[in-house]
Amino acid sequence: MWYKVVGSGKGVPLLLIHGGPGSRSCEGIPSYATLGGDRPVIFYDQLGSGHSDRPTDTTLWQLPRFVDEITVLRKELNLTEIHILGSSWGGTVAVEYMLTQKPKGVKSVIFAGPLLSTSRWMRDAKILLSQLSQPVQDTIQKYESLKMYDHKAYIAATDSFNIQYLSRKPGVRIPVPDCESSGKFNAELYRYMWGPTEFNATGTLKSFERTDRLREIKEPVLFITGRFDEARPETIYEFQKEIPGSKVEIIENSGHNKVRDNPVAYLAAIRRFLNEAER
């Protein structure tokens, strides 16, 4: 497992759990590193992702093993106290860590556009799809039924979805040095755990549901999502009700990729919450 620690601030370290499954942490380093004046910020790539090893043994691609990575990192870096931020699928890993390990020393948890319920994620995706033009909806439904996920018409239609709800600032990406030697998105891992399409889970996460256990988390919690996020604000407010005292931040002008769409507001909300949690 590859990891990187940025920042010399004296606050409690922040551990970032990236999305996917199969994504990578490097693209967020320039933005999240700005929190380093307050505290160390710890990036790592999950097994099969980014700079980390990429074994093809699918028995490793199970949620409990990804949870174990946090335990290993905390021991390796002597992280007796930490804040945790789980983004998208990273929120899945974070909630499972909190519920199954009952860890000590976690000062707060941030769920950023989290996957906490597969059934709810798919229901939200259908709601968002219904807001697109009818031709786009028809194209997606057609090629989903045919299971032709690589057809250029299907890809174009899903691009329409992505620019609305994934990242509203696709544009030209600024090169990130940490990404130059990093592996690309691991589509095989994503398909094994989630499925071939964003809209219907068929992999090992298809039955994942933790909404009914959220109230077991007693640490300070922040739910943060974009105004146009795949993790819809309406759903996030429902999650909030399950954890008394938890907070919600909605990032304006942003889709799922908040650190790209509106980094100033997103990082300000995170910084504010972390400082309050420590006080």
Image (cartoon, helix red, strand yellow):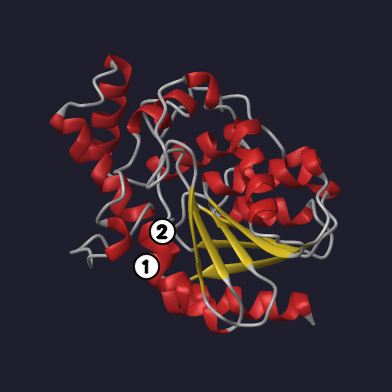
Q: Which mark is residue 257?
A: 2
Q: Are marks 1 and 2 in contact (CB under 8 Å)?
A: yes
**Horizontal arrangement in the rendering, residue 260 relative to residue 194 (left or right):** left
**Horizontal arrangement in the rendering, residue 131 relative to residue 222 (left or right):** left
Q: CA distance from mark 1 to mark 2?
A: 6 Å
Q: Residues within 10 Å of mark 1 (few under 14, many from 20)?
A: many
Tell me the amino acid under the disc marked 1.
Asp
User: Residue 117, position in %: x, y?
Assistant: 63, 37
Say how many tags the image has.
Answer: 2
**Horizontal arrangement in the rendering, residue 170 relative to residue 243 (left or right):** left
User: Residue 52, position in %: x, y?
Assistant: 42, 43
Please name the residue shown 67% across and 57% down the image. 237
Asked where in the image residue 205 lies, by quadrant, the reply is: top right
Q: Can the viewer see residue 222?
A: no
- Give the residue number, with chain letter if any, for mark 1: 261
Tell me the amino acid under the disc marked 2.
Asn
Please name the residue shown 38% across and 58% down the image. 26
**As displayed, is residue 102 above or below residue 60?**
below
Callout 2 secondary element: loop
**As displayed, is residue 73 above or below residue 78?**
above
Asked where in the image residue 22 lies, by quadrant, the reply is: top left
- Between 103 and 141, the one lying in front of the other is 103
Q: Can the viewer see residue 42?
A: yes
